[in-house]
């Protein structure tokens, strides 16, 4: 069963690589992309342009974002009773210990450093997808 | 320091003991003086009374006796002239004998009374005259049977009357002398009484003066010193102590004042030092603040390096690879090689950035100082190197390692680099073997000396120092991969812990690194060493 994935990513190049990875892996998931933290929250709370947005089953969240950065978005999601159930994978270039520590303290479900090597990047995206699509049981999405 | 005006300068030369002796001496002098005066006064009084009792009194009596003897003589002569009875002459002859004795007595008693004595001598002269002129011729005439003329008798009577008058004159002279003596005695007695009263007065006055002087000169300065000392005790350290009173009290004051001055000085010094320390602390605080800011900036830089610098690299590598994938058919071998180099360069740059970050963070992000089992650090490093150990088929020979003081993350990094190097630079001719041993550092007490030796390709002694320089490589990238940061990192970690690391240049086969670290616990004694050795051998057996 295909799922809705929300990619929060400000870099079009990274968005492109992630899309390539999804396509390359022949995953039939729907990929929604937002450019910054504010838009991500609009999407999740269905505000403004995103009034008709779907509730994502998985969020791939970059940390360094314009307006609200990834940490603030993560804090909002995990502080919200309703949204907290959605698994969040932090997908970022940073391998800094403090970023990893902080993300997990904010209850990120996983932390993945974007590999430099394209093949490894593809593999990482595939593994994330596989893991959340087939291995784990996700909460029943209350789609409206 | 200002000295207060001395009010009691005059008493300055005497000490309390001097004062004590002066008072005693004054009293002794007074007593002696009064005794002498008393003796003199008494002597005078007794002399005056003696004069009365033993001179004038008896002289008066003797005079009276002489007069009555003379009357008896004259009466006797007249009786003899009438009767020619020699019995009447007895008083005359007796009186003649007694007269000499009485006169001598009288003279000796009146010794010193010049006028009275002159009167007595006049009297004696008159008696002799009467006797030779009248008494003796009358008796001669009667004995010769001649009668004495009436005229002669009349003349004798007249002379005798004159003699009696003379007696009266001497008597009155003696009475006058006696009156004078009485008056003198009474005068002397009065004088004596006044002398005693005055002596008593002088004595009391002296005692009063002494009490007053002792009070002013000794007790008052003492009390003042006590009050001033109390003021100082209560905190008025700047009040100088007045130096007054006897010499030893002045010395005491001066000593106390010197003590106070010393205290004030050291107090001032302490305050000065305190101010100095405060200033230094402020400077240090400023520097600490500066350092903290600089560290924060460095941290910020490190973060930028880890994230923002890598982001473009990742793009370069990823899209080069995408080109390779997407346009595989359009690329020839040369094109693919170009892409390979671009991707490889980007990847190496990323590794370099990460290594440099790790290097810069030693002692900043990891700065714990705790008891660390060096063995546990080695074990965790070996876990991470598991693949390399298996691939090379290396043998790790070691005895259990001691506990040290330091940061576990950094120490694991140290082991990973040292053992990693030993495996990486192994000799193709030999089975790789890494032996790790340790002993207490003979040069630096409280430190352990750890040795990591391999049988690899070794390092030429010429490069013994160079290997620790960052980015210094001894081999081409094709032969051995790496950024040249590993040993620089090891050096930084060891030195951060206060230890040293060096290359054993005497080793002929392979490489031997030696480093020191602060021991965590007191080093075990020799017996325990022996036990450790036994265990080490057992362990070697099981690992090999």
Image: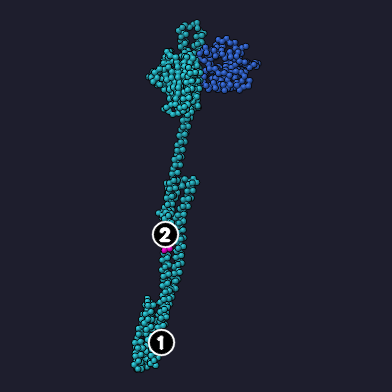
Chain A, colour shown: blue
Labels 2 and 1 positioned on one and the same chain: yes
Q: Nearer the viewer, mark 2 or mark 1?
A: 1
Chain letter of mark 2 equals B
Determine contact: label 2, label 1, CB under 8 Å: no
Which disc, if any, is residue B72? Answer: 1
Residue B359 screen position, x and y as percent = 46, 22
Most foreground residue, A8 or B526: B526
Q: Residues within 10 Å of mark 1 (few under 14, many from 20)?
A: some
Main secondary structure of the magenta stretch: helix
Q: CA distance from mark 2 to mark 1?
A: 69 Å
Disc sitting over residue B254 in the figure: none
In magenta, the rendered stretch is B23-32
Note whether B147 is above or below B384 in the view shown: below
Relative image position of residue B297 (x, y in whole percent): 48, 25
Q: What subunit carries mark 1?
A: B
Q: Hey, which quadrant is residue A32 in on the image?
A: top right
> In the image, B314: left or right of B180?
right
Q: Nearer the viewer, residue B122 or A71?
A: B122
Q: Position of residue A108 (x, y in %)?
A: 58, 20
> Which residue is label 2 attached to?
B25
Residue name at image x 45 percent, y 63 percent: B203
- Residue at 35% over, 92% down: B143
Q: Nearer the viewer, residue B363 or A31?
A: B363
Of helix, strand and loop, which one carries label 1? helix
Of all chains in the rendering, the one displayed in cyan is: B
Q: Secondary structure at mark 2?
A: helix
């Amino acid at each position: 069963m295909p799922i809705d994935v929300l990619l929060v990513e400000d870099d079009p190049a990274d968005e492109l690589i992630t899309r390539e990875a999804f396509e390359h892996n022949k995953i039939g998931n729907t990929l929604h992309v937002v450019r910054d933290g504010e838009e991500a929250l609009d999407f999740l709370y269905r505000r403004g342009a995103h009034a008709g947005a779907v509730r994502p089953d998985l969020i791939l969240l970059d940390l360094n974002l314009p307006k609200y950065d990834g940490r603030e978005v993560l804090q909002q999601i995990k502080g919200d009773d309703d949204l907290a159930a959605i698994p969040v994978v932090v997908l970022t270039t940073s391998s800094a210990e403090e970023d990893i520590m902080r993300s997990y303290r904010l209850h990120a479900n996983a932390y993945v450093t974007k590999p430099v090597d394209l093949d490894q990047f593809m593999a990482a995206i595939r593994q994330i997808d596989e893991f959340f699509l087939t291995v784990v049981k996700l909460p029943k999405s209350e789609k409206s | 320091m200002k000295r207060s005006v001395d009010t009691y300068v005059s008493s300055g030369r005497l000490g309390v003991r001097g004062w004590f002796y002066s008072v005693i001496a004054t009293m002794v002098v007074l007593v002696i003086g009064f005794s002498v005066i008393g003796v003199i006064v008494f002597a005078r009084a007794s002399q005056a009374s003696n004069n009365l009792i033993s001179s004038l009194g008896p002289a008066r009596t003797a005079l009276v006796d002489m007069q009555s003897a003379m009357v008896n003589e004259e009466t006797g002569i007249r009786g003899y002239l009438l009767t020619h009875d020699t019995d009447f002459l007895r008083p005359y002859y007796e009186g003649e004998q007694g007269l000499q004795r009485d006169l001598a007595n009288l003279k000796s008693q009146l010794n010193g009374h010049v006028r009275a004595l002159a009167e007595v001598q006049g009297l004696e002269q008159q008696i002799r005259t009467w006797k030779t002129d009248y008494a003796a011729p009358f008796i001669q005439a009667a004995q010769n049977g001649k009668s004495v003329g009436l005229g002669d008798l009349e003349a004798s009577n007249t002379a005798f009357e004159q003699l009696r008058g003379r007696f009266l004159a001497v008597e009155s002279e003696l009475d006058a002398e006696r009156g004078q003596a009485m008056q003198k005695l009474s005068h002397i007695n009065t004088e004596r009484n006044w002398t005693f009263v005055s002596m008593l007065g002088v004595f009391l006055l002296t005692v009063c003066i002494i009490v007053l002087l002792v009070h002013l000169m000794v007790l008052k300065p003492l009390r003042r010193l006590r009050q001033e000392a109390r003021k100082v005790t209560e905190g008025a350290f700047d009040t100088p102590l007045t130096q007054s009173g006897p010499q030893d009290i002045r010395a005491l004051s001066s000593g106390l004042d010197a003590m106070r001055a010393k205290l004030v000085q050291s107090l001032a010094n302490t305050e000065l030092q305190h101010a100095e320390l405060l200033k230094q602390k402020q400077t240090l605080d400023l520097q600490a603040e500066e350092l903290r800011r600089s560290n924060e900036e460095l941290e910020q830089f490190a973060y930028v390096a880890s994230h923002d610098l890598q982001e473009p690299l990742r793009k370069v590598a990823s899209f080069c690879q995408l080109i390779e994938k997407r346009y595989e058919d359009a690329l020839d071998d040369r094109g693919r090689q170009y892409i390979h180099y671009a991707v490889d360069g980007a990847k190496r740059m990323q590794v370099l950035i990460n290594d440099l970050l790790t290097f810069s963070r030693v002692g900043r992000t990891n700065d714990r100082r705790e008891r660390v089992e060096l063995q546990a650090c080695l074990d965790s490093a070996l876990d991470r190197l598991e693949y390399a150990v298996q691939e090379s088929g290396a043998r790790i020979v070691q005895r259990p390692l001691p506990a040290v003081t330091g940061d576990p993350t950094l120490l694991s990094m140290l082991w990973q680099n040292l053992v990693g190097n030993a495996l990486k630079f192994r000799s193709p001719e030999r089975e790789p073997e890494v032996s790790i041993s340790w002993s207490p550092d003979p040069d630096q007490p409280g430190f352990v000396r750890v040795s990591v030796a391999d049988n690899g390709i070794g390092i030429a002694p010429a490069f013994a120092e160079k290997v620790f320089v960052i980015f210094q490589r001894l081999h081409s990238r094709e032969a051995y991969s790496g950024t040249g940061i590993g040993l620089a990192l090891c050096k930084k970690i060891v030195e951060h812990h206060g230890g040293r690391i060096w290359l054993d240049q005497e080793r002929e086969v392979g490489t031997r690194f030696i480093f020191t670290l602060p021991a965590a616990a007191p080093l075990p004694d020799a017996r325990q060493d022996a036990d450790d050795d036994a265990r080490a051998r057992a362990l070697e057996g099981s690992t090999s």
